[in-house]
Amino acid sequence: MKTLMLVSMAEVRESFRAKWFLLYSLVFGGAIILLFSLGITESRVLGFTGLSRLLITYIQLCVAVLPLFILISTVRAVVADKENNVVEYFLSMPISLASYFWGKLAGKFFVVFLPVIVALLAASAWGFIKSLDVIWMEVLYYSVLLGTLTWCFLGFGMLISSSVKKQEWALGLAFSIWLILLIFLDIILIGIMLQHRISESLIIGISLLNPLQVFRTAAILLFDTEGAAIGPAAYVIVDAIGRNGFLLFSLLYPLSLGWLLSWAGFKIFKHGDIV
């Protein structure tokens, strides 16, 4: 555990010095400041107003931007160390393969989750100061939901980083996975259903294999109990497992998928060419 913490702290210090972390922090912190300055909390869209209106917009930003930042910053974690002989240096010290791999993963999680959660909590605190309605249990759930999404895509990133031999391949795979998951949110699945007249329950079930779709749907259901903003798909989901059941599923599924992908990445790293 001590060596795992040392690897994690080394990863955190290195990330804090990187220029991408500054840009990453500015994107989420600047987005919250910009949304407040534009008066978005005073507008109403699809019944959302006040802090809920801001958080719904923040959800859309997280769906599009957060996974890409996570993948780009993570897929080079292992493969870059191999190319630069950093892994060989680490393993020359009394550090196990497990401590190195899971320490890198824990450090990455702290670094990528910190700006996101700070921006969310700052928005909620500012909304409270401005006398907006803030339901803290919803803010807490949304914070955990963001954490599970972060962990899920960290799993994708570590699996890719452990599997490839070049950083360019890792970046290409990361961008491809992000683009495929983003495209499959709605457009392609709706087109398939209309073209082949497949059961809507089957299409929705397939779409919920996409962690981005799960995150987006749960985040909207959190603020819109009837699911009016989602459309007819909400009725299928609510009838199948209920709103609370889906909110629980949306936490467990990305978390489990992230662990599965991370474990697969560790097995490949452990039994593959270390240096």
Image (cartoon, helix red, strand yellow):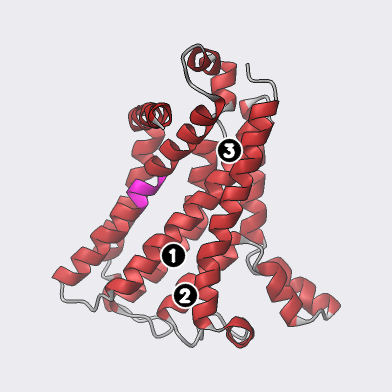
In the rendered view of the protein, which quadrant contains the N terminus? top left
Residue at 59% across / 26% down in the picture? 79
Q: Is residue 88 left or right of residue 197?
A: left
Do the CB atoms of the residues marked 1 and 2 lie less than 8 Å apart?
yes
Assign a secondary structure to mark 2: helix
Q: Is residue 115 magenta?
A: yes
Region in magenta:
112-116
Q: Which secondary structure class fits the magenta region best?
A: helix
Residue 170 visible from this viewpoint: no
Q: Label 2 to label 3, Cα distance in Å? A: 29 Å
Assign a secondary structure to mark 1: helix
Image spot of residue 115 (x, y percent): 33, 48
Residue at 38% across / 42% down in the picture? 110
Q: In the figure, residue 9 lies in which quadrant?
A: top left
Pick whichever of labels 1 and 2 is earlier in the sequence. Answer: 1
Residue receiving disc 2: 220
Residue at 41% across / 29% down in the picture? 11
Image spot of residue 256 (x, y percent): 58, 56
Residue receiving disc 3: 158
**10 Å crowding of disc 1: few (<14), some (14-19), many (20+):** some
Question: What amino acid is found at the position of numbered circle 2 in the picture?
Answer: Ile
Q: Label 3 to label 1, Cα distance in Å? A: 24 Å
